[in-house]
Image (cartoon, grey):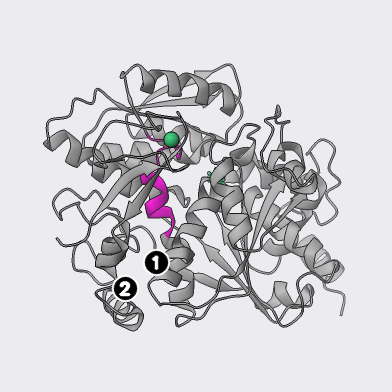
Amino acid sequence: MRYSAVFQCFSGCPGQWAVTELMYTCPTCGGLLEVVHDMDALKDKSGPAWTKLFDERYRVNQWPYGSGVWGKREWVMPCVSDDEIVSMYEGGTNLFWADRYGKQLGLNDLWVKLCGNSHSGSFKDLGMTVLVSVVRKAIREGKKIKAVACASTGDTSAALAAFGAAANLPVVVLLPRGKISTAQLVQPIAHGAMVLGLDTDFDGCMEIVKRLAEEGLVYLANSMNPLRLEGQKTVGIEVVQQFGWEVPDWVILPSGNLGNASALYAGFKMMKELGVIDRYPRLVVAQAENANPLYRAFVAGQKEVTPIVAKPTQATAIQIGNPVSAPRALRALEAMNGLVEQASEQELADAAARADATGMYTCPHTAVGLAVLEKLRAKGTIQEGDKVVCISTANGLKFTEFKVRYHEGQIEGVNSNLKNPAVLLPADFGQVVDAIYKRFPS
Ligand SMILES: *Cc1c(COP(=O)(O)O)cnc(C)c1O
Ligand SMILES: [Zn+2]
């Protein structure tokens, strides 16, 4: 294979390492690593030649190209061979035309990328297929890995457990007890992972798993490990592909640990460097007001993110106060002329209900993105004719408790303005008829 990718320090310290090395930070400065590709080698094809190749592979049945990630393997992880790849046909998700919801907001061109319509129900599958495939390669090369582990707010652990089980790798997940949905908790249990429910929040779990990895007890599968970002960066590429290789004006992304925001930029940067696109969309990072360290830094014009203790939010997957990828996300915001906006619990709950009533089924994180969209549209920052993409990060079916409680009016501190509770009646034909006439009088 003439293409290659290696680890390098994100802050520019010298040195490059194979992606199968068991390392998660720069040995010189202790900072983040990134994966860098041999861009000169990739320039052997023109932009249009790459897009033609990617279109030919899109959702075909030939292993492994039907995966939205491995259909772009040269740009993602060229060193992994077909029989090392652990894939579940991730990616290739619907880019939903939110026509009715968009019109309600005064938008003509609104799209929702449904990354939650995936094997384990969230975008985390896109990164995990790459990480677990590289782990399999490392083990074949003789590296000793006792178990692969992550801290999680629910979706990373579900994805890791699924891919780990498919590849017959031992998996350990550290979860903040009582802070994830039932569906998310049962996923790694069902996949046979070792599930540790710790009496802390995500940031507390992250501290412990980082230490386990530093001491060589486990291989770290959190997005601090840049292998994850290589898979996740295909979201932006796939969105542009689904528009016939046209760039939208805005991409809105609900964010917590900020890995995905960084990955999104990496995908757009690669497309620009390789002649596939000639401009970037503007990036909007959407945060829950109760877990908003990036928003605070952005508003204050700071070049660094100060960790906070995140407060509880319905958007549990982004209840993170100390985002690992903050330096990467700041770089993404700068390059993509980005914005950070936040949504309150009331705003996200109503946005979810409003969107669902137009046929979507939004998870609370996606609702943070939609609530932010509603605000930016109301302010006029986003205009009527703009082409806007909201990234939906997880499947709403994982968050049944959130939806039940909203429609029953049971979320503390939130008015269920748009609730639609079930009508409970005896099995009486006349009463059913009366109820229908009451609801639809004309
Ligand atoms: C992981 C996750 C996020 C946040 O992604 P980051 O990379 O941590 O910013 C958002 N929504 C859902 C549903 C997630 O699972
Ligand atoms: Zn360094």
Residue 65 as seen in the image, left or right of residue 104: left
Q: Quadrant of residue 378?
A: bottom right
Which amino acid, by three-letter code, is at mark 1?
A: Gly
Q: Report if the beta carbon of the residue with label 1 is closer than 8 angstroms to ligand 1.
A: no
Image quadrant occupied by the C terminus = bottom right
Which amino acid, by three-letter code, is at mark 2?
A: Tyr
Q: Quadrant of ligand 1?
A: top right
Residue for badge 1: 92
Q: What x and y, as percent, mark residue 75? A: 31, 62
Q: What x and y, as percent, mark residue 43? A: 29, 72
Q: Residue at x 46, y 37 (%)?
A: 32
Q: Residue at x 33, y 31 (%)?
A: 23
Q: Nearer the viewer, residue 301 or 198?
A: 301
Q: What x and y, as percent, mark residue 52? A: 30, 82
Image quadrant occupied by the N terminus = bottom left
Look at the image and tell me whether residue 126 can be seen.
Answer: no
Instruction: Look at the numbered discs 1 and 2 and tell me whether their residues touch, using CB distance below 8 Å.
Output: yes
Q: Within 10 angstroms of label 1, few (less than 14), some, or many (20 or more) residues?
A: many
Q: Residue at x 25, y 34 (%)?
A: 21
In magenta, the rendered stretch is 221-233
Q: Residue at x 85, y 54 (%)?
A: 417
Q: Quadrant of residue 106?
A: bottom right
Residue for badge 2: 58
Q: Is residue 379 magenta?
A: no
Q: What x and y, as percent, mark residue 97? A: 59, 76
SS at mark 2 in the image:
loop
Q: Nearer the viewer, residue 112 or 415?
A: 112
For marks 1 and 2, give the CA distance.
Answer: 7 Å
SS at mark 1 in the image:
loop
Q: Nearer the viewer, residue 18 or 105?
A: 18
